[in-house]
Image (cartoon, coloured by chain):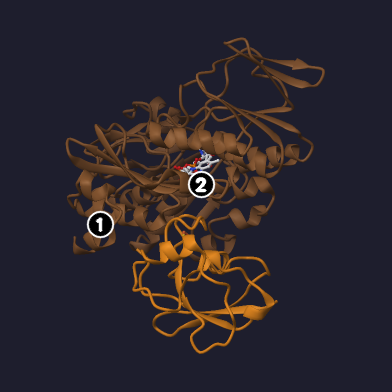
Chain colours: A orange, B brown
Amino acid sequence: MPKIIYRQADGREDAVEVPLGWSLMEAAIQNDIAGIVAECGGGCACATCHVYVGQGSKVELPEIGDMEGDMLECTSAERRDSSRLSCQLRMTAELDGLVVDIPETQT
Amino acid sequence: MNPYVVIGAGQAGMQVCDSLRKSGYDGELILLGEEDSLPYQRPPLSKKFLTGDLDRDRLLFRPAAYFDKIAVDVRLRTQVESIDRAARQIVLGDGSTLAYTKLALTTGTRVRPLNCPGHELDNIYYVRTLTDSEMLLQRLASTERVAVIGGGFIGLEVAAVARELEKQATVIEAQERLMARAVSPVVSDFYAKLHRSRGVDVRCSSAVESIVESKQGLLVNLADGARIESDIVVAGIGVLPNSELAENCGLACNSGIVVDEYAQTSDPHIVAAGDCTMHFNGFLQREIRLESVQNAVDQAKVAAATLCGQPQAYRQVPWFWSDQYDVKLQMAGIGMPFDQYAVRGDLASQAFSVFYFRDNTFVGADSINRPAEHMACRKLLTQGTTLSVAQAQDIDFDLKQLAKAG
Ligand SMILES: Cc1cc2nc3c(=O)[nH]c(=O)nc-3n(C[C@H](O)[C@H](O)[C@H](O)COP(=O)(O)OP(=O)(O)OC[C@H]3O[C@@H](n4cnc5c(N)ncnc54)[C@H](O)[C@@H]3O)c2cc1C
Ligand code: FES
């Protein structure tokens, strides 16, 4: 199964197998990755599943949807070019090995 | 020392356990729940789960391993019968007893059952538990026509799913408008139009007289003489707080378990949180019972803090959301009742917010497909920033900047 690497602000990494089609938020929650809160359970309504993705990687992520873009304006940690909501990113084979950085705060 | 015991393995119960551990409580901790699943999310039960897009494992808040890791003894299919406060023990369904040092009640709510003639017929469904939703999901596969009784959030979400699955859908609402308890007439009207444009037969001011079986399925008879033919009925007519345990052991209750700003009940050893509480809300400065994820999570944190002897008052701004079709409603604060309102944006484009004011104070906003405005409103309300009607309806006025400025 393809993997995602969740990296904490302090550099600690967890490699997690993610079933295709799952969101990166769900995989983080089911594997008890610290720092992803996901209060609304993937409803794109809380912005507490904020992550930074794709730095130093060539994978193409799907474009940021309108709703996601709006919610990204409201993250607790600063928004960067690499900011995404992990509940809106679905696992695909291409994402295997992607590093997902978890911000220091979500609330 | 006897354990800390949490009764009700839902969102609030799971959060109490999580927060107790995070606050450093390292004694024995038991989470009791009568359902047969680990704590799971309810919001998808009337949304994505009903379309068949999510399987049940994906509804769990946390996997079983998590509870092992934080040393929570989760006992499912375990119903609590009564609480003996004097002896500080609880009695379980099988007659056994369990002593506690501290107790948290997170028993949630249950659906209000229909009581019209015919309410006991087959093919009448409710949506509260995973089991409820699984049964409905299964039945929808062989259903053409769905009659929804109750035009509140859950009823309307079910109607939207039914249309997405290309079923015929009728919504029967007793009040003169949809979601009347929670949103203003502007928002109700918007949703009535939305559902009608998607092919739902929306009938407001329609009381159900009876439900009868017919050759083709069910007939819902309305007070105005209309008859709705349907294969199934889904009822979403509100909930009742599970406060009997508390009432029967003499805790103060008033349409819910009464707690103060610290989630403390009338017994110093017992806290309560979530849908089951009638609580003093520090943000609203009045008593209220809220049925929302926000309240379950935030009040549970407050309850855990109280149990750990680090009390912090419950002041969080209420928020809520509802997904119907591709339209997202997000609510910040409590807009009802209001004496003035302002619309920002364009109803026809299905992206706008309605701001509510009471005595010239901004008290809440409903945002439709406007998440950034919703988040700005939560911030403004949290900070108590002054916002005027003129500013709210001026689309060029920068709300986010105002929120940032504090
Ligand atoms: C279909 C649906 C859609 C929703 N959509 C949204 C939404 O979009 N946004 C939002 O913010 N909120 C939504 N909600 C509301 C939200 O899910 C609830 O507010 C939240 O689940 C409340 O959590 P709780 O822990 O207080 O109660 P619950 O989740 O109800 O948990 C209480 C648990 O206690 C158990 N229990 C009760 N009595 C006993 C006993 N004596 N012994 C043992 N166990 C007991 C119950 O079986 C239950 O499992 C929705 C709810 C439903 C049903
Ligand atoms: S989980 Fe709430 S926005 Fe992603």
Which residue matches tag 1? B397
Q: Which residue corresponds to the image point at 42% horizontal and 79% vertical from the top-left?
A: A81
Q: Residue B121's quadrant in the figure?
A: top right
Helix, strand or loop at mark 2: loop
Please count the marks in the image.
2
Q: Dot 2: few (<14), some (14–19), or many (≥20) neighbours within 10 Å? A: many
Q: Nearer the viewer, residue B119 or B101?
A: B119
Q: Is residue B225 rendered to the left or right of residue A84?
A: right
Q: Dot 1: few (<14), some (14–19), or many (≥20) neighbours within 10 Å? A: few
Q: Is residue B135 rendered to the left or right of residue B103?
A: right
Which residue matches tag 2? B9
Q: Residue B87 — which label? A: none
Q: Chain of mark 2?
A: B
Which amino acid is tagged 1?
Phe
The alpha-carbon separation of the residues under discs 1 and 2 comes to 45 Å
Q: Is residue A25 visible?
A: yes
Coordinates of residue B137 in the picture (x, y in percent): 70, 42
